[in-house]
Amino acid sequence: MFGRFALALAALPAAIPPAQSGGLHKDEELGFQIQVPKDWKAVPLAAGERWMVAKYLSNREYQTKKEWGYLHTPEMRVILFPAEVVKDRGPKVKKKEDGTAISVRFKSDYVDYKSYIEKNSYGGYFFDKEEETTVNGIPATCYEIKFEKLTVPRRAVAWVFKGEDAEWAVHFEVLEDWWEKLAPEFTRCLKSFKFIPRKGSVTARAGDDDLGFDTIFEIGKSSPAERALKRAALFEQAVKEAEGRLPEGWTKKNTRNFHAFSHTDDRYTARVLEQAEALVGWLGQNCAWVGDGVPGPAILRICKDREEYSSFQGQSSDISFVNSFEIATFKDREGWGSAFWNMNGELANPWFADKNPRLRWGMPPWLNEGISHVFSSASAKGGKVQFKPDEWDRERLRDIRQKGRLATARTLLGADDSEMSKVEDSWVQCGTFLRFLWTGPKAAQTKELFKKYLQTYVAVLEEEETAEEAASKVKEKKGKTEEEKEAEEEARFKERRQGEKKRLEEVLKRVFGSWTEAEWAAFERAYASAAE
Amino acid sequence: MRAAAALLLGLAAAPVRADILALKDGRFVEGVKIERAEGGYKLLYKNGEVHVPDELVKDCLIEGETGFEPRNEEERAKLEKGLVPFEGKWVTKAAREAAVGKRLAEKKKKLEAAKAHREWRNRYTSESANFKFEYTVDPEVQEKLRDLMETYLSIFTKKWGIARPKEKLKVCLYHDFEVFQQVSGGAGSLAYYRFVPPLELNFFYERLDFEFTAAVMFHEANHYLTHLINLDFHYPHNVNEAMAEYYGASQWDPARKEMTVGRIQEGRLMEVLTDIQGGQTHGLEDYLANRLGYDNYSWGWSFVHFMMETPKYAKRFQSFFLALGRDSDVKRIGDGQGRTVDGDEIVRVFKKHLGVADLGPLEKEWHEYVKSKLKVESVRGYEQAALKADQTGQPTRARRFFRLALEKGSTNPMVYREYAENLLLDDKPAEAVEILRKAITLDPLSAPLYARLGTALRKQGKKEEAKRMAALAKEIDPDDLDLLDAVVEAVGEAAGSKPASRPAGSK
């Protein structure tokens, strides 16, 4: 899992040109310019983006001409492949100073436009045309790509311009139904591509360094304070990158836990920040005991609408929250509430990851689903957080109860992943149960139940890790027969397969071991009543 | 593996001519000098020679080939007069060169055309009685699969009392997995049947394992065939996938014109047995109520196999399956694109048609069937058992099954490769080298095999030879080397090198 996170952040170039709207895109750092279709707007690039150097979105949405009327906003991307970076494809291997270990850092495997599209598109596609040409004296390969299977039909045109030390791919994409109408404008823009005197370096973004993202989640090898310092350094760099790539019309606002970049009005921005701060504040007040890590700030990207948000989310596939610390949302003009669902859900994960990575990546299934559900529908007003089920939740719960499928609290607490997959609407049920633990009526026995459960769970996780470390140091006995080895391997395999279940059972035993059946029955009644 | 096209680019010392080797598995080799050798062809890479036997070769173009060496005095005398043999006659060298030149030009054109067809925009198209094909495999491969599909449709529709389709189904067949993923959009799957209009079947040709290709075809085509029961109905995942897996193990004997169904899906059986070994079983109600998710492929298959292969249940189970799609008393629900049934209704209909009120005894019978009747006995079975054991961290068990698979006659190079990997981890490089050399005779142009051979030789201390093998692997096909190969090589080299910097305080 962490192998993917071992991609290093790039060093910042000296200055990055502000992204523009429509007209001419001129990038003096990288030394190129190209016309952009009229009224198209620049889309910001995520802080961790290393390949795309410009992105624009059409000023209007288009609909397919078929009955189902799928909506799509045409876009333009400029992707840079520096020769020095792409030639060195393999993993970077280094021996540690004391010679005891070897570290391997994986690099993104984009070497050209085709390999980039393979990982950064959706739907089945093929290259319908592939021709060589020259544009303003620059050799180029012209591609037309058809997206046909398992997707809404689209077409893309990409011209890859070959410079001395890099290739620039300029990619336009539109619904197939609108290709004939828009293609001439795309061609006009593509034909305008030119190199201009360059002030910076093409390798600045895609270079490699040793900031070591993977080590901010290592436990035991560094203290919480050391991890926090490292995180702060990476975050500062991420903020600088994000600021440097901010298009016109975006504003910045910092609060206690967020650096917000907003493309919408101040009032909505304030509302989003209020919600985000309230949720993170709630976690800090109510879950501070889950670990000794120091939660750090995040970048909050507030897009003007869903289209801009969707386009922003379409960054190069090799970045993730860990690389860029970004959480994105948008101004919800449709009134479905999905803008906050997404943002809320994304807020809790990094907080837990900072606070206690061991817990975050090893959460019991009911809590993993429960947090995701409860946070999604959470709301905040005046700094106060409310965890209430919405109408959809209530409808699902009614249906579950009618079918007699409401799982008991004991079932949810003891279910491993395989068992949880058999619980009807497990996301809703786990969320309902967690909401009950957080906000439901409290008998003396159950008042601090959530805290007691989670602390016990973390303790059991730590004991398991200690036992694993001890077992790995035990020297392998020589002279074992093949049968003995096979039997030992089988025993270890069984232990691993049953590991999650055993952990959950152990926690149940420690937390609820003293409970009588009557106490369980009362607890289950209270939960079932809360679920109505 | 990144080979998006079936082109292998040799990186030999500057080739002076454009020789091309076309393999039966659909790949092409270019950019390397080729010579005829006994029993096949020799490819002269910078880092070594690779022998490719005739049985793997479809065609070969060696530019400038004269092809004549005099074997006796009479032939030497003819050669001195300026004559060379050509198709049973003695002709002048110039005449032969002109004729051979023409042939070579035609062959080159044919090979270039075959290569061009690997691009989806240049795909072949053809039709049979019930299917419309679009494909990038060689026509000979498509014909084999086409015949299999027509036969399958004929047999299945007859057995299940299904009317023949009115329209032909579009079938898209790709020459390798990467192209399938890219063009079909089926990332994360091996194949798929698109069950909403336009109906379509997509799968790929696995060059190393035709039986696997056929199994995938049988599985996906089964979704189409069962869809024909009622085009407005979508069978739920549990019975849909389990039935497809049951038919996935079918086999057609063209000589006897017989189709055998109900064979063991060894891979799925191993998944079930591994679950049982790990202490996990699934109940019948959970399966019927559609709660097993991915395990419908393995546990579901084992249940359908139990039903269809047990005479007292087979007819009733078939009747249950048909009833879900057809009977008027079955309560169906919308699924957004058609109709289906939910878990509770599946259980009710099943109980009705099987005549049971309590699933307990049947569940017990099923579990007993799995443990006692389904056995791993074939080469493929042992291969699957070995791979599964390796995947689940049981290398000793894996080695036992690898040995059995090879003893039984496995010819799957991928299995040999995994076995060699296992031996290397068990610190047995000499054995690994032997296994990899055998694998290379089966698949002489597999870059990963040479890469692994390099690793094994390095562990034996044969560093120069190891380096040569690693370099040869990159020459043969750098795009076919996966990340693991690169990491293993890089780590191996680093392990033998000095640390990047001296520890603090040292001189």
Image: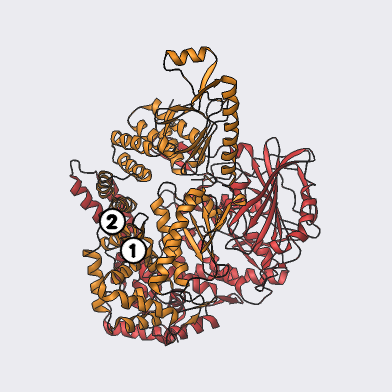
Chain colours: A red, B orange
Give the side of residue A20 with respect to residue A268, left or right.
right
Is residue A201 shown left or right of residue B346? right
Report x, y in % for residue A200.
Answer: 71, 40
> Taking the image as drawn, is residue B99 in sight?
yes
Residue that sits furthest to the front in the current view: B89
Q: Dot 2: what SS?
A: helix
The tag on residue B261 is 1
Q: In this picture, is A502 found above or below B380?
A: below
Name the image quarter holding residue A268. Answer: bottom right
B17 w.r.t. B131: above or below: above
How many discs appear? 2
Disc 1 residue type (three-letter): Val
Q: Nearer the viewer, mark 1 or mark 2?
A: 1
Whole-percent x, y for residue A154 in the image? 66, 60
Let me know if marks 1 and 2 both belong to one chain: no
Marks 1/2: CA–CA distance = 34 Å
> How crowded is the residue under tag 1: few (<14 C-alpha within 10 Å), some, or many (20+)?
some
Q: Is residue A225 visible?
A: no
Three-letter residue code for mark 2: Phe
Q: Dot 2 corresponds to which residue?
A: A493
B188 over B420 or under it: above or below? below
Q: Residue at left 32%, top 78%? A: B316
